[in-house]
Amino acid sequence: MILLQLIILVTCISCTIKHIEKQKKEWERAKEVLKLVCEAIDKSKIANAHSHYYTGPILEAARQNDYEVVDAILSRSPEAIRYKDEQGYDIIQLAVIHRSEKIYNLIYLTEERKSIYGTIEDSLKNNMLHLAGRLAPSQKLKRSIGAAFQLQRELQRRKEVKKLIFPAYITKENIFKETPDMVFTREHENLMKEGEKWMKAVAESCSITAGLITTIVFAAAITVPGGINQELGIPLFIDNTAFTIFAVSDAMSLFASSTTLLMFLSILTGCFSEQDFLHRLPRRMIIGLVTLLLSTTAMMVAFGTTLYLVFCYQRPWMVAPICVLAFLPIAAFSTLQIPIIVDLFQSTYARIFGKPSNNCRIAFNPNDIRLYFGK
């Protein structure tokens, strides 16, 4: 049986590696095709060939956050930084509208970015902060788990664009008499309601679990395994190493579950304003889930040591099944919760804006495109 499981595992790993290698080859081929197409356009003798052939692809690449295509085009045609679509939006404005962070980060390559985009407006008098206030496309929203963290990502993008805008334009109205804050609130009204509902549902469920754990481990603490010496008033197993493990793990579980309960109760009693979704509520959610995982693990350790102290006297063979059975719920809970905790931590603290990293190869020369930013 074990041999069969190993064979299945090795087969799955082999298939995964082959799939990754296939995707890598396809990606390399696509890059080569892109290079050949760009070279053919460069050799074309048609008047304004760059403007004719590059405008559509670079604008669509900006919408799709395809940095490779934008980089390849800008390296051959720096003036493409100012190409615009039918509505008058260039690639940076499209990057804001379509939440294309890699394209938006191009503006960090020039020191004049604020003087250029800090006052720019479209035909409806919408500045960059108005554009950032629009609701993101659904496919971009779905990249974050839960409505609350979709709203958090929207707030993070808006906060970043706000740094680009001159102070006077932060409260400037468009032709509909709407400020950027009004646009954001109107566009994200439903998402905020869904985020509040999602947060409360998770908090209620986890609060019930934390309350049950607190009750169990508190009862275990006052009714110690093995009983108490009636004359001395101390536990009978006080000199046993397993009892020390029980005491420590039971205390850890009690303190962690109490912290979990307080964190999720603070979420349930919060006011749920827009800015709370940026840091305060996600931070409490992360702390609550981490302490819930810790309390569950410590509770199972305490329960396992209790079984050992009470039932395993002169039965050492029982230690192995107790450890295995105690590990199963810990492994199941960790498998379900750790990926969520990691996603929440990355969503809250990971840096997505700034100059392209050293790992991101840039083919175009920032000095070349800097000449076209103000045109």
Image (tube, grey):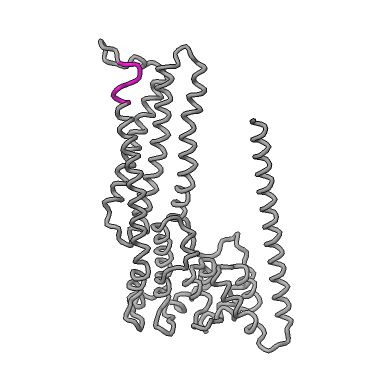
Residue at the bottom extreme of this rendering: 47
Is 224 within the magenta?
yes
Give x and y (percent) for residue 26. Answer: 69, 61
Task: Say which of 191 and 359 sits in front.
Answer: 191
Residue 10 lies, with reference to residue 16, above or below; the image says above
Question: Is residue 33 rendered to the left or right of residue 151?
Answer: right
Residue 121 lies, with reference to residue 343, above or below; the image says below
Residue at the top extreme of this rendering: 231
Q: Main secondary structure of the magenta part?
A: loop
Residue found 31% across the figure and 34% down from its top:
214
Is 233 within the magenta?
no
Placement of the N terminus among the 4 image quadrants: top right
**Residue stretch in magenta:** 220-227
Residue found 57% across the figure and 74% down from its top:
60
Question: Is residue 345 rendered to the left or right of residue 170?
Answer: right
Give x and y (percent) for residue 73. Answer: 63, 75
Q: Quadrant of residue 172?
A: bottom left
Task: Say which of 355 and 190 sits in front.
Answer: 190
Residue found 44% across the figure and 82% down from its top:
122
Residue 223 lies, with reference to residue 192, above or below; the image says above
Task: Say which of 161 and 88 sits in front.
Answer: 88
Residue found 48% across the figure and 24% down from its top:
322
Question: Is residue 62 rendered to the left or right of residue 208?
Answer: right
Question: Is residue 299 rendered to the left or right of residue 110?
Answer: left
Give x and y (percent) for residue 304. Answer: 43, 25
